[in-house]
Amino acid sequence: EVQLQASGGGLVQAGGSLTLSCAASGFPFDDYAIGWFRQAPGKEREGVSCIDNSDMMSYYDDSVKGRFTISSDNPKHTVYLQMNSLKPEDTATYYCAARNAGCAWKVGGPYEGSSLWYDYWGQGTLVTVSS
């Protein structure tokens, strides 16, 4: 059974930090890209960051570059998203997803609609940043 378990969300003040975790099982982790997406109330889902475990390339949306860091612990089948200097506009439910054919990312962000290309999704974890 495929599982993606996102955790680590919470309430934090602006300028603070959180680390999200995505624990994966049921598929060959080393062959998959793991992406983080977020969706705020009333807004479309957007890509935040992605790491391709096949070559360890990582990608960031321009809105989080320099503040967020994605990493992968392959033996633990877990991907982390370290989020620093959080802003109120980072408030959203964050989801992790897995794709067998790379991140589908271009410079500055994901290809439009690429979230539809992901094979597996986890449940979300809520991040709330207060001003």
Image: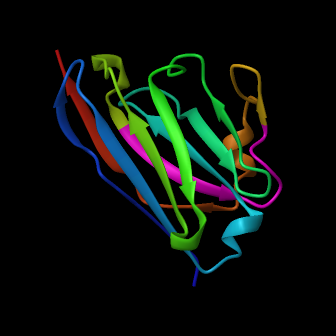
Does residue 102 belong to the magenta stretch? yes
The x, y position of residue 89, in whole percent, is 35, 18
Residue sitting nearer the eye, 20 or 46: 20
Image quarter for residue 110? top right
- Residue 35 on image: x %, y %: 61, 47
Q: Residue at x 67, y 69 (%)?
A: 29
Q: Residue at x 70, y 61 (%)?
A: 119
Q: Is residue 116 above or below residue 38?
A: below
Q: Nearer the viewer, residue 25 or 1?
A: 25
Q: Is residue 98 magenta?
A: yes
> In this rendering, would 125 be left or right of 54?
left
Residue lying at the far bottom in this picture: please name it.
1
Q: How many marks?
A: 0
Q: Residue at x 36, y 25 (%)?
A: 90
Query: Is 72 left, or right, of 129 in this rendering?
Result: right
Instruction: Give the residue at x 61% y 81%.
Output: 26
In the rendered structure, the answer to whether residue 18 lies left or right of residue 83 reads left
The boundaries of the magenta stretch are 93-104
Q: Quadrant of residue 10?
A: top left
- In the rendered view of the protein, which quadrant contains the C terminus? top left
x, y (%) of residue 128?
Answer: 23, 33
